Image (tube, helix red, strand yellow):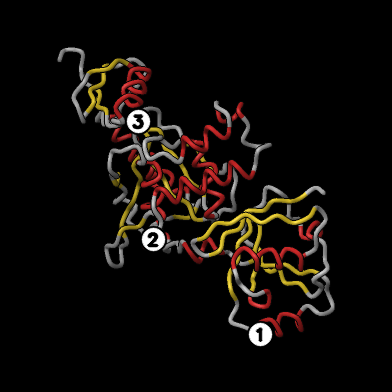
Amino acid sequence: MPVLTLQVRYGEKHVSVQVPDGANFRQLQEKLFEATGLPIDKQVVSVGFPQQRLLLAEPNAPLSALKIGKDDILSLSATGGSSESASSTSTVASRPVEARPVDLARTRFPILDPELVDLGGFHREPVPGDNSCMFTAVIRSLQLKGITTRDLRGIVARTIEANPNRYTEAVLDKPPKKYVRWICQDSSWGGYIELSILAPHFGVQINTVEIMTGHFYRYPQEVPQDTPCVYLLHDDTHYDYIASRSLVDGSRVSVFSSGDLRVASAAKRVADDLRRNRQYTDLGGFTLQCQECFALVIGQHGAIEHSSLTGHSRFQEISSGL
């Protein structure tokens, strides 16, 4: 019998559940109970972006009616108990299915009033120059608590495994199983594939600004204007992120609204200033020096080869006269 495999976030856990093709909501709840131990009467299931909480009066409603498919990632949380269940049932007793939007991203990543952000204070926030710099930049810019770079690598790996039709060898440039093993290694660099997975996972937009060109890359490309977003800086070998400060207490601010064009302009100015000061690495054909063993390599191919042999990842462009 065909089955539907769904990825589920439950607190800090990430689990997979399988239900028969054509299953109803109660069957999904039973599988969630088996996987997490959370009783059915305390389950709150959300889906989609922005997250929509599913309030059902009819447990036999098919999942297809809820627009739940194999590429969806569900969120599971616990209610306060029977009182909430009772009120929910009475509210929707006359309707088989009702969805109430709950913007979990804005709750988890609160956006400071734009008028309270110092538009002149945007700057580059450096992260350690190791093979996990992209993951670290995501964690620090989103100010994720209790989450490690290995956790993010695991999210990427599970998403790829759960979506074989989307993440094919042609997309990954290597067999999916091999890619999953590779990205779970601390020595592997993250890039656009990982960003395109992590952004919707956390319900945010991740913008990458290329220092050398000033180009923006957005993951995902289109989101509602009030979606929380962050800005990463990329120079071919390393990721940092952009931050400013609060005009209220001077605290660091790195989560913004995706529709705030002033922030996007400020982020571009940061990249432009770094480019003018040549504070970037061009891997197209320049001589690079490894900042860990001081070996000299030529171009991107040389840097990648050196990194694969040594695990070193911090390179700096040097002038031809040295």
Residue 11 position (above or below residue 216) = below
SS for tag 2? Answer: loop
* Secondary element at tag 1: helix
Location of the C terminus by quadrant is top left
Q: What residue appears at the point 45 percent right and 61 percent down from the top-left corner?
A: 111
What residue is disc 3 on?
237
Which amino acid, mark 1?
Ser
Give the CA separation, mark 3 to mark 2.
Answer: 26 Å
Nearest the viewer among 166 and 115 is 166
Q: Look at the picture and state if 314 lies above or below 48.
A: above
**Image disc number at residue 146:** 2
Q: Residue furthest left?
A: 322
273 on left or right of 85: left
Q: Is residue 130 left or right of residue 73?
A: left
Indicate which disc residue 82 carries: 1
Q: Are marks 1 and 3 in contact (CB under 8 Å)?
A: no
Describe residue 51's horizontal placement relative to residue 25 as left or right.
left
**Residue at image coords 57%, 41%:** 221
Sequence-earlier tag: 1 or 3: 1
Residue type at the position of mark 2: Gly
Marker disc for residue 52: none
Question: Foreground residue, 130 or 4?
Answer: 4
Task: Give me the C-alpha separation between circle 1 and circle 3.
Answer: 53 Å
